[in-house]
Amino acid sequence: MKFIKVKALLTLFILTTSFGAATSQEKHQIKLNKSSFGEYPAVIIDLKNNSLTKINNDFRSMKEIKGDLWIEPRDPEINGIQSSLERVKHVGKSVLLKLIEADLTDQQIQELELTTFQTRIKSESIKSGIVFAVIASDGSLYKVTITDFEQQKEALKLDYYLIE
């Protein structure tokens, strides 16, 4: 069986950037703490636009979600937003994640087998220092590092950049 490489998948997409959008090797950072949340202690992260969406208790009534990651530090939870959600339209493709070694080069990350990616990072793996690759909702590839995580304080800091 022939496996599709991440790099091959990425060549199908033409990436455009705008003010504030993630560009290759430009590092971005998102910091989460209790003040980052709406009524519900989770956020949706849009990696391309370096933005977050607060979630209310009635999030299932949302008509549309634009973003890549669902992050809930209290549980903890990091999930890729999926294209088929109950009653909510996700703008884009299903987001896939893979824990990786911190010293993998961008080239090595691009060559990872697509079949090894999953829809979430297991809660027991979520801690300061972990690194994971994200195939975002627009098909772009990111390298993400959790640089700080304090579950009791519901605080999490992500550093990330776009791999081209």
Image (spheres, rainbow, N blue to C red):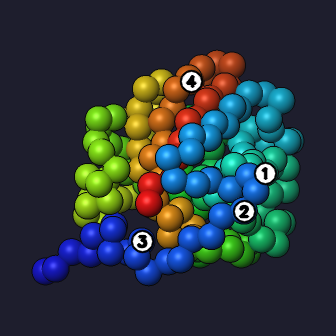
The Cα atoms of the two marked residues, 3 and 1, are separated by 26 Å
Amino acid carrying mark 3 in the image: Leu
- Tag on residue 10? 3
Q: Secondary structure at mark 2?
A: loop
- Tag on residue 144? none
- Nearer-N-terminus badge (4/1): 1
Q: Tell me the residue at 44%/81% (across/down).
A: 12
- Nearer-N-terminus badge (4/3): 3
- Tag on residue 149? 4
In this picture, residue 144 sits left or right of residue 65: left
Q: Tell me the residue at 62%/74% (across/down).
A: 92
- Tag on residue 18? 2
Amino acid carrying mark 1 in the image: Thr
The label nearer to you, 2 versus 4, is 2
- Nearer-N-terminus badge (3/1): 3
The Cα atoms of the two marked residues, 4 and 3, are separated by 30 Å
The Cα atoms of the two marked residues, 4 and 1, are separated by 19 Å
Q: Please state the horizontal and vertical placement of residue 108, each as a whole percent of the image.
A: 26, 52
**4 and 1 marks in contact (CB < 8 Å):** no
Inspect this view and state whether residue 85 appears.
no
Q: Secondary structure at mark 1?
A: strand
Q: Which of the image's four quarters has the C terminus?
A: bottom left
- Nearer-N-terminus badge (2/4): 2
Q: Please state the horizontal and vertical placement of residue 101, each as a whole percent of the image.
A: 29, 37
Q: Is residue 141 above or below residue 104?
A: below
The Cα atoms of the two marked residues, 2 and 4, are separated by 30 Å
The label nearer to you, 1 versus 2, is 2
Amino acid carrying mark 2 in the image: Ser
The Cα atoms of the two marked residues, 1 and 2, are separated by 19 Å
